[in-house]
Amino acid sequence: MSSGIRRASWALGTVARPCRTDPAMAGGLRWWGEALLGAGLAAFLCALRVQAVCEGATVTQELLKEGFHRDLLLKVELGVTGEHAGGCTVAARTHLPPGIYVDPYELASLQQHNLTKAVLIPDVVDVEAPEYLATGLLVLLYLEPDPWCSHCFRAALPVHGRYHRPAEDSEEALVILRSPEVLVCCCDNRLPAECWKPAEVDAACSGKNAGPCQWYNLIHKSAHEESILQVPVGLTQHSSMVCAVTLLATVFCSSLILTAVCKYGQFSEKLKEVTLGR
């Protein structure tokens, strides 16, 4: 019994005895801990610095005018990041929902007079289609330098609202326009990777250099995440009245046109010739 007690006491003493650590090993562990802590702190400070620099770029979009026909105004302030984009082309890529569109014929006229420059994808747009039969549209709008602001760019583009289905209790339909992407195309220099990342763009760079050019996407913050376009719509309870008034107006106008043609047009002259000939 006494020998068993002595063995148990020896085992407990062995377990309870504190572990001895090699001084060299302890120093190595301390060095690795300090190194990891320093690396993490440096990465955190670097992320804060990059975020502060990149957040200097701001994008603002506004919908001017009222009703169906609006002007989309885009403003981009590059801030500190604009120091690296000297001589580069700045553009905004925005996705238009089915409820809003750009008239390609109007855009061609504006580009012919050098009032704006944009690329539509797809380039064929059905301007007569209602909202529920239309598809979305991708617009690449080239921005011009703002003479009143350093590292600022702006551009305006006419947009139009589509007709929506009649509503039951609201006289307006809401079309949400998301914040655009800011793109920069550079031919002579490469932009730092902190705020810029390469982007795939199906459009040519308008730079003068004929060498290889690269599009970049800017990490930025938006003044407003989205803009809302309010489009007037009809009410379903007015459908019968609208159809009746439209039918009466069509019959009345057709009667006036037919009367004028019979009285003053070539149809009356030929009728007289046929009558006199007989």
Image (cartoon, helix red, strand yellow):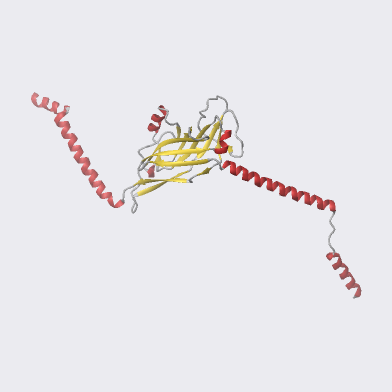
Instruction: Give me the residue at 23% from left, 45% from top.
Output: 245
Count up the numbered dots.
0
- Residue 143 visible (yes or no): no
Front-lying residue, 253 or 111:
111
Left or right of 219? Residue 263 is: left
Q: Where is residue 36 in the image (x, y as percent from the top left)?
A: 72, 48
- Residue 271 visible (yes or no): yes
> Considering only vertical position in the picture, is 194 above or below 110?
below
Q: Position of residue 14 (x, y in %)?
A: 86, 65
Q: Quadrant of residue 268?
A: top left
> Considering only vertical position in the picture, is 35 above or below 273?
below
Instruction: Give me the residue at 38% from left, 32% from top.
Output: 106
Image quarter of the C terminus? top left
Q: Where is residue 64 in the image (x, y as percent from the top left)?
A: 39, 41
Q: Where is residue 217 in the image (x, y as percent from the top left)?
A: 55, 38
Instruction: Give me the residue at 68% from left, 48% from top.
Output: 41
Left or right of 171? Residue 203 is: right
Image quarter of the N terminus? bottom right
Q: Residue furthest bottom?
A: 1
